[in-house]
Amino acid sequence: MPPPTRERHDPWHPELTYVIGHQRPDMDAIASALGYAWFLGQTSADKVVAARAGQVGAQAAFALGYFGTRPPRVLSSAAPTFGHVASPQEPVTPDAPLGEAMSRLAQGERLVPVVDGDGRLLGGLTPLALARAYAQVAGGLARASEQTCRAYVEKLPTVPSGDRIRDRRGTLLRGGGEEFLVIGEDGRYLGTASRRCLLEPPRARLILVDHNELSQAVTGADEAEIVGVLDHHRLGNASTAAPIPFVVEPVGSTSTLVTEACRQEHVAPPADIAGLLLSGILSDTLVFRSPTVTDRDRRAADWLAGRSKIEIGEYGRDLIQASPGLVDRSADQIVDGDRKNYEMAGKAVSVAQVEVTGFGELPERKPDLLGALDARREREGLALICLMVTDVVTIQSRLLCRGDAAILGGLPFARLDGSEFDLGGIVSRKKQLVPALQGAIEELE
């Protein structure tokens, strides 16, 4: 399978609120982000956009193509960067009269950037440099102002716009400077930043859908402002500075909650959004065969099917079967395609899930898959990592595991060999597998 194409990762904008699903977004995360952003656009004055924290999976790609809808924009990080605090202060060239810079500093500017003809940063001029010029030039201030800026340019702390402020804050603050220069990826000057910006950077505004745990959220979410949550998973949320809308309901899909919000406010989504929300429900409930399904999911799906002119049975089969088999993907793609991290009794646990239409390919891929699990366990310091392989035809699952021997020995499943378990009719990671793993690990304490 060819490697995925490189996607553009646009930085977040402080005037926007991002509705975003978890890392490695599944169908429900994509659908609920698009659907909830559309809903809030109809019912609030905020500038709201849908976003995603990873690549679109096969099911979501199928649904987006079917309904002719663009995916949410990629938000690779919610952390503040120097690009967010760069102030576009006007630069001067090396041959500019020194008097020009002196005049600007006299008016209160702390730093005058100096760039070459291509806009590449050479350094800056500070009050200290200009005091030195005054002292060195016979004739005092008048003669000094006749000089050019070239001889007095200082090398000052310079940071790339894409660097996270948190990663450079300590070093820059210890350096003692008041102002810093910010450059783009091409080395060209972008602006200046102050010490105050390092201490009080802006924060991205996020509404989390289909998750509420920071361990599953977009990178940098711990530095963002969480302004809302809409989810159907267990609670594992971080604290917030102020009360926020926080909705977590025991339904089969976050798309159900978006649909109910639309119906409650009497706003009907267009056919493409309705179709995507329907896809989120059908995917998460395995077309109503998962134990997570509720009557609320069925009612929401019926209403959405009418809005999108979709026959649920036929479309649901096509959607579920859109996922490629085990042979068509690399082990890394299978393990990381839908993987979530948890903390259970103080231990780091990661659980991936992949849907197949039969276990026939599993024996051939098992060595590679176990190797991928081993690599992640070592790299991420995990006590347990699992891959849940779910057959969407027979509604049965197998579990590949790597972890501490004590944990593996305490798992309440039929063990097929040292690393594979038969889960029988367990098909829901959220409602069935994760609670069982949590209970087994807690019993070891």
Image (cartoon, rainbow, N blue to C red):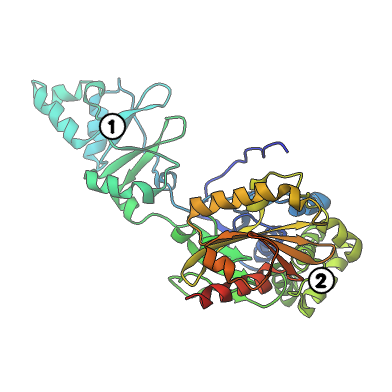
Residue nearer the viewer, 234 or 362: 362
Q: Residue at 86% x, 56% y: name it.
A: 318
The quarter of the rendered structure image containing the N terminus is top right
Distance in Å between CA atoms under marks 1 and 2:
66 Å
* Residue beneath disc 1: 124
* Residue beneath disc 2: 289
> Horizontal and vertical percent for residue 71?
70, 50
Q: Residue at 79% x, 65% y: name it.
A: 282
Looking at the rendered structure, the secondary structure element under dot 2 is loop
Residue nearer the viewer, 272 or 119: 272
Residue that protrudes farthest toward the front in the picture: 417
Q: Quadrant of residue 427?
A: bottom right
Q: Are marks 1 and 2 in contact (CB under 8 Å)?
A: no
Mark 1: give few (<14), some (14-19) or many (20+) Cα within 10 Å.
many
- The amino acid type, in three-letter code, at marker 2 is Arg
Along the horizontal axis of the image, is 81 left or right of 251?
left
Mark 2: give few (<14), some (14-19) or many (20+) Cα within 10 Å.
few
Q: Residue at 44% x, 58% y: name it.
A: 223
Looking at the rendered structure, the secondary structure element under dot 1 is strand
Q: Residue at 28% x, 45% y: name it.
A: 172
> Horizontal and vertical percent for residue 158?
33, 36
> Horizontal and vertical percent for residue 271?
82, 60
- Is residue 56 something that shows in the picture? no
Disc nearer the start of the sequence (1/2) = 1
- Is residue 308 something that shows in the picture? yes
